[in-house]
Amino acid sequence: MSESPPPPSARRWILGTALVVWTAWLIGMVAGDHWGLFREGWFMSITMAFGSFVAGATSEGGGAVAFPVMTLGFQIAPPVARDFSLMIQSVGMSSAALTILGSRIPVEHRSLIWSSLGGAIGMIVGLEFVAPRLSPTFAKLTFLAVWLAFAFALFWINRYREREVRLDIEHFGARHATLLLGAGLIGGTISAITGSGLDILTFSLLVLRFRISEKIATPTSVILMAINACVGFAWKASAGGGMAAEAWSYWWVCVPIVVVGAPFGASFIRDRSRLFVASILYVAIGVQFIAGLVIIEQTPQVVAFTAAVFAAALLMFRSMARGGVRRLDWLTTVREDGAGQ
């Protein structure tokens, strides 16, 4: 499929948002004399050029690229990588979210409400009670295991190329709100550990359980992660003891890049099939997991923890998929009963 430029409305939002952020960033750089940070943090600028684009184009947040590169590739402490991921996504993903909303790209609005609420609770609980008790090694393993399980979920999603999909959650009720709230709670807690998680949990729930089209689920997950990152950033910076100083250094050298990378990714996805995007994610997740196995010392405890987290995540995604099959059968029955009346 040939690539087409972003539509005029998207281009206006991308440019307008970028100009505002670039102006504020430039003032901050000059006032704080932060130009020297590029000498040490240039590798993060390059990383986030790719990471922000992936974040806007897929259900992955930018933290899903930043966290493994920082912790596995450059041996940066997971709390620093997590802080940076939340900080940079509050800019990049928020810019993409504004582009999505301003361009009137369809999203599942009720999911935004309920998953954001659960995500905010999960983020705060995770930052205060879960992440501080998790060792750096186990934080890395949590990321690797959950994302590997997500790769399997993507495979389940894409087994049937012409499967029946929906544009919203039909016959929405309290049970659906509870599922979205629960996914947000779990996803927000994972985000508090690794910097991303709410996006993939809600994306998977929408596509696997509710059979929502990826064209709807992807921009919805982008907006959700933007909100969750802002919540995490605000809480950690104020009530949570402040963001790591090293994370701020990386943030300054990445802001001008992600403010355009993520919105362009959000526009790019308009002209790409879900299989194209899935293929990119398969490769990225596979490389991350293999790199983790090589870099992290494999002890019986490490292997057992990885297997347990992977199995739990896989079981959760599989349960979503099975629930989706039952839901389609139920919707078909409801439709047939309505037609017969």
Image (tube, rainbow, N blue to C red):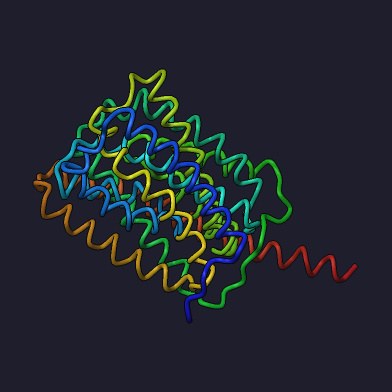
Residue 46: image quadrant is bottom left
Q: Position of residue 200 (x, y in %)?
A: 44, 51
Say left or right for 318 vs 42: right
Instruction: Choose between 306 and 200: the one closer to the eye.
Output: 200
Answer yes or no: is residue 323 visible.
no
Q: Position of residue 31 (x, y in %)?
A: 33, 28
Instruction: Choose between 257 and 60: the one closer to the eye.
Output: 257
As drawn, which residue projects farthest toward the right? 341
Say left or right for 231 vs 250: right
Q: Quadrant of the C terminus?
A: bottom right
Instruction: Choose between 125 and 253: the one closer to the eye.
Output: 253
Say left or right for 20 vs 73: right
Position of 333 relative to 260 (above/below): below
Instruction: Choose between 333 and 28: the one closer to the eye.
Output: 28
Q: Position of residue 308 (x, y in %)?
A: 28, 46
Q: Which residue shows up at 69% across the image and 62% down it?
A: 330
Position of 266 relative to 71 (above/below): below
As drawn, which residue projects farthest toward the bottom? 1
Q: Which residue shows up at 37% across the image and 23% down it?
A: 128
**Number of marks in the rendered image:** 0
Answer yes or no: is residue 185 visible.
yes
Q: Position of residue 25 (x, y in %)?
A: 39, 38
Q: Which residue shows up at 40% across the image and 68% down it?
A: 278
